[in-house]
Amino acid sequence: MKPSIRHDWSVKEVEALFALPFHELSFRAQEAHRMFQPVGKVQLCTLSNIKSGGCPEDCAYCPQSARHNTGLQPERLIEREVVLEQALLAKDNGSTRFCMGAAWREVRNNKDFDEVVEMVRDVGAIGLEVCCTLGMLSEQQAQRLADAGLTAYNHNIDTSPEHYAEIISTRGFEDRLRTIENVRNAGIQVCSGGIIGMGEKRWDRARMLQVLANMDPHPESVPINSLVQVEGTPLENEEDVSVWDFLRMLAVARVLMPDSMIRLAAGRTRLNQEAQAMAFQLGANSIFYGEKLLTTGNPEMEKDRKLLAKLGLEPLEARPTHRHEIRLASA
């Protein structure tokens, strides 16, 4: 019989998990994973950056902020036909979830959002799970995406509420929670995690996971990111997160949120095969697949395929999606 899932963790309890000897934490994480997750399955997700650069936010980690001199040139929303081609190729390459990201502070009710809604319909129509990350979202906007068949919405809380102002000043932590609530109220799955390596203390990591673990229900997907330092951002000189800190973060997330997908996200490419194998053993069961994405013969995808085969891991099947007729402007 499965134990009940908790939503009442204290920060001290979470800190105690971080303080466990690694072999004990590893056992706890594997135990939780086997009780609640399909063993030997990993969800393969492909990310498409459908609109890059020019974001007015000042997130200290982000190269897409217009406030940072990273050399990234702002681009307009890409064509709907191109997104569909990318999604079809991602499906052919084995992905079951297609994530679309736009560098917006918030969604505006305009032609670009209308186009994104149609992209959601298109991707859902070919049998993929559909995820978007578009910034802050109103309840009405969330409902439009739900009606179009959106599977999940990504909106990370990034760090602890207490450390948040050190990283972002252009919006508050409560704004993050409000968008997550709007997504949940629309019946869309929540994808929300955070980033480590931004000058926070271990307490902040515990606090961030406590916030996520005390949501009821838990986010269906929890991405754990390790900061990728980008020249021109305020965090460009931060030290790399140690492999062990990253693995502990994944393991504690699995213990706290046993029924969630724990996504091994940014920072995965820094891990060697042995560390990635351990991450899967600790309960990570979702990855961005082929991060230099959407080209035939993608070497990153080939590496991932070989690693998963070596470990005996299989792609998790997509859940049923709403079917919508694809109506392209050129049709």
Image (tube, rainbow, N blue to C red):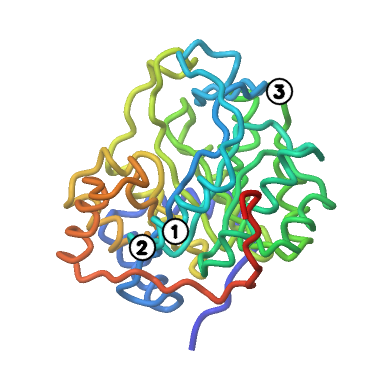
Name the residue furthest front.
331
Residue 252 shown left or right of residue 267 in the figure: right
Give me the C-alpha separation between circle 2 and circle 1: 6 Å
- Relative height, residue 184 to residue 104 (above, below): below
Residue 78 found in image quarter? top right
User: Dots 1 and 3: beta carbons under 8 Å?
Assistant: no
> Which one is closest to the eye, mark 3 or mark 2?
2
> Which one is closest to the eye, mark 1 or mark 3?
1
| Element class at badge 1 | helix
- Percent position (x, y) of residue 240? 32, 28
- Relative height, residue 314 to residue 294 (above, below): below
- Percent position (x, y) of residue 9? 60, 58
* Amino acid on which disc 2 is placed: Asp
Say which label, 1 or 3, has the lower sequence index: 1
Give me the C-alpha separation between circle 3 and circle 2: 40 Å
- Relative height, residue 314 to residue 65 (above, below): below
Q: Which residue is mark 2?
A: 92
Which of 67 and 251 lies nearest the eye of the viewer?
67
| Element class at badge 3 | loop
* Amino acid on which disc 3 is placed: Thr
Q: Which residue is mark 1?
A: 88
Which of 174 and 86 lies nearest the eye of the viewer?
86
Residue 175 shown left or right of residue 240 in the figure: right
* Amino acid on which disc 1 is placed: Leu
Q: Which residue is mark 3?
A: 170
Residue 232 found in image quarter? top left
The residue depicted at 62 percent of the width and 45 percent of the height is 155
Which of 130 and 152 lies nearest the eye of the viewer?
130
Q: Dot 2, crowdedness within 10 Å: few (<14), some or many (≥20)?
A: few
User: Dots 2 and 1: beta carbons under 8 Å?
Assistant: yes
Q: Dot 3, crowdedness within 10 Å: few (<14), some or many (≥20)?
A: few
The residue depicted at 54 percent of the width and 22 percent of the height is 60
